[in-house]
Image (cartoon, grey):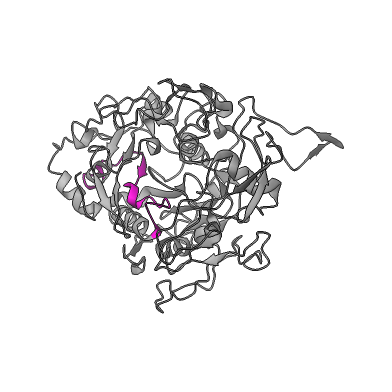
Amino acid sequence: MHHCFRKTLSLAAAVGLTLLPVIPAFADGTSTTTPIKHLVVIFQENISFDHYFGTYPHAKPNNDGSVYFKGPKDDTPHANTLEAAGLLTNNPNVVNPFRIDRSHPVTCDQDHVYGDEQFAADGGLMDRFAGTWLRNGSPFTFSCNDTGTGGLGPNSVMGYYDGNTVTALWNYAQKFAMNDNSHSTVFGPSTPGLLNLLAGNTNSASITNGKSGMGNIANAAASGSVIGDPDPKDDMCSNPARAQITMSGRSIGDVLSDAGISFGSFMGGFIDCHTAAHVNVAGSTVLDYIPHHAFFPYWATNPNPNHLPPTSISMIGKNGDQANHQYDMANFFQALNAHNLPSVSILKAPAYQDGHAGYSDPLDEQQFLVTVINAVQQSPEWKDTAIIVLYDDSDGWYDHQMPPIVMQSNVNEDSLTGLHSCTSMSQQVIGGVIQPPKAFDQNGRCGYGPRQPFLIISPWAKKNYIDHSITDQSSVIRFIEDNWGLPRIGNGSHDAIAGTIDGMFDFDDNAGTGNGKGNGNAEGNLPKLILDPTFGTVVTEN
């Protein structure tokens, strides 16, 4: 196995720049409805909102006395956190939430199965995350038992970090905009999250290699709605022992391609997907590339099954190249350094830096986030760029906020409001008549799912701002469609009803006046926040 031991991404990118010819870049020739010309989406793994922001903006010193988060700023707005809700004590679960120290970054991987997450939410009571419960006549435990030296114990799911571990994210929230009411589009693990990010839809999947649909497709069917983590069919690194699927219907990639707008997905380890690996902070070797975290291989419309590189730096993001919009992370830095950044870039960190419990951790994740965000801020493209940081699922980590149920389902795996049941707990009254709750005709899409962090880092983001409007993963699609004047995906895509993220921007306050919440862009001093990738601390700030 080839071990890329902790090389920085910037170094890898610099080396990679010598591998491809530079051809003069050409522009999309497209216009946008906002000043945002470049959108960079960093799609991380498996974090609930309370797991990272449960006491925001108040952090306690680490066990060794170290303090890295120097906030909060005086004007920090209120967020819906564990602390604010009074749930650090007197919690409805059998144990109270507890702080995880920075010295314990690697934990066990919690239960984030589609139906299990619903059962833990218990129809909105949010009280089955810890302890053992009777489910269908059998004992059920949701939390993993984090054993080993200094382990968190059998109720590890109730643990949370604060700003002296996830320092960079807290500093970004202090400088830019964060949403505290953003959710997975549906309950469940990674693959449903990425399908909703790209298509707003987990339906229309078909298993192609004859494997069982159990745990992969709703009702254990061979086709239908994805509820698990099957691998994509068109990927040479997919595991033949796992169910492999292909998605019919359209993704945002199809919409962008049709419009001639440049885009690309950039994944750690894409080129050397069988061998590229890194060592995490716990000393474990982790393969960089995980097929069921991939993006466009689930659709046949942008094929690159053999992971071919782009033919030139200038073709990154463009139609008609052998890479077909699928790239290695090094290609992102090549495009950025050559001033050929695609209009839409979707990033997946090497696995050891993606934040997923079990093999990644907040400290390795911070290295990736800060390296990427620093590089974008230091480029000329920063002036018209928005970076979104969001997550594919919650990993099952406790979050106190029950999501609104906008899509109902009654497949065998549903467990929110009873056996085989995910129904809305609220009633809508129109003209004095109680309306029956609405459901999509594509079952197995119970949602919204758990709440996760969602941040926008941009010179156009409101400053030290918390947005409370309901959003989900498909809200990113909606922004892309609205910003570039593109049609909705259709076919039941959630983009049609997704909440907008527009409230996190201030496109009118160019000079930092107006409503007083913009970062201010007209004076030639673009707001920037350059951080240290190891500690997340502020290096320079404009």
Verify whether residue 347 appears in magenta: yes
Where does the image place residue 419, in percent across and percent down from the top left? 69, 36
> Which of the pair 203/265 is nearer the observer?
203
Residue 430 horizontal/vertical position (percent): 81, 36
**486 or 523, which is in the foreground?**
486
Q: Is residue 472 in view from this perspective?
A: yes
Left or right: residue 287 versus residue 481 is left
The spot of residue 103 in percent (x, y) is 39, 68
Residue 344 vs 170, above or below: the answer is above
> Residue 231 appears in which quarter of the rendering?
top left
Direction bottom: furthest residue: 65
**Residue at image x 59%, y 43%?**
116
Q: Residue furthest right?
A: 432
Q: How many marks?
A: 0
Horizontally, residue 394 falls left or right of residue 122, namely left
Q: Which residue shows up at 43% across the image and 71% down it?
A: 69
**Horizontal placement of 329 versus 401: left or right?**
left
Quadrant for the C terminus, please: bottom left
Residue range of the region highlighted in magenta in the rendering:
335-362
**Name of the residue lying farthest toward the front:** 138
Residue 526 among magenta residues: no
**Residue 50 point in image, percent of width and height:** 55, 58
Q: Is residue 278 above or below residue 105?
A: above
- Look at the image and tell me in which quarter the N terminus lies: top left
Return the residue nearer the eye: 326 or 242. Answer: 242
Whether residue 514 can be seen here: no
> Which image quarter: residue 406?
top right
Answer left or right for 16 relative to 487. left
